[in-house]
Image (spheres, grey):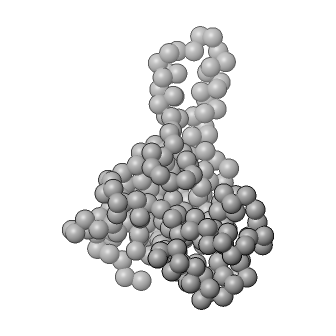
Amino acid sequence: MKINKILKSFIPVTEGLGKMLGEDYEVVLHDAKNPENSILHIENASLSGRKKGGPLTDLGLFLIQYYNENKVKYLVNYNANANNKKLRATTLFINDENDDLIGFLCINYDITKAEKLKMALFENEESINYIKKLLNQMTETHDLDTNYENKSETIPKDFEELIDDYIHNAQKKMGKSISELSRSEKIEFISILDKRGFFLLKGSVEELAKKLGNSKFTIYAYLREIKS
């Protein structure tokens, strides 16, 4: 696979940041033009269990659309989760000379150790205010200030898990399993997925058709109906 020259120049940046920040920081370079195999390089991958060639998260797919509407440069210190670990995440948007989004540089910090240290210090009445303030800064996160439905990002290990996460979250919003959906509810279900960038993934229509018990042509028909 040919790598965009601009993104290729970020590979040593990704490597350097990973080595400088250490094992509690996962640093990931994504190709936004290839969402189902977006990970070009990853440092300290044991944090999430992902590997090179893995997909974008559901948030990443959403942010492709969000960038096109808002032209943001970065999102800083928002909530994320991976392998039952709470993360503080930052995403930097990478664009080309035409200001089109081509990639993301993501830094995910595992705040587990800092949280444990903070709790231990807070149990001591002689805790120093400076240390308390410093640790609060290290562990502070916030909900995403976007119209993204989830307030934090969940990081899947692979493409299959990403698809399952999308389906699960949409089912949760519908309040029933996909096997119970009527035709109109299936259209609503598909609309939820569409708004969250699900159909940017190659093979998403085929996977959804299997889950819903419909043909891919039916899914395309529903999508046309939604967009008409």
Measured from the top left, where is residue 47 in percent x and y? Answer: 59, 54
Q: Is residue 215 visible?
A: yes
Hey, which quadrant is residue 176 in on the image? bottom right
Hey, which quadrant is residue 123 in on the image? top right
Left or right, 132 with reference to 161: left
Left or right, 178 with reference to 49: right
Left or right, 163 with reference to 109: right
Residue at (58% x, 79% y) in the render: 222
Measured from the top left, where is residue 207 in percent x and y? Answer: 64, 80
Residue at (73% x, 58% y) in the render: 175
Q: Is residue 80 above or below residue 116?
A: below
Measured from the top left, where is residue 113 in percent x and y? Answer: 60, 37
Hey, which quadrant is residue 209 in on the image? bottom right
Left or right, 104 with reference to 189: left
Residue at (45% x, 49% y) in the render: 146
Q: How many marks?
A: 0
Q: Is residue 28 above or below residue 158?
A: above
Measured from the top left, where is residue 8 in percent x and y? Answer: 33, 70
Q: Quadrant of the N terminus?
A: bottom left
Q: Is residue 43 visible?
A: no
Q: Is residue 135 above or below residue 213?
A: above
Residue at (40% x, 74% y) in the render: 33
Query: Nearest the camera: 182 or 13?
Result: 182
Query: Nearest the camera: 2 or 183?
Result: 183
Query: Nearest the camera: 128 or 39?
Result: 39
**Residue at the top extreme of this rendering:** 126
**Residue at the right extreme of this rendering:** 180
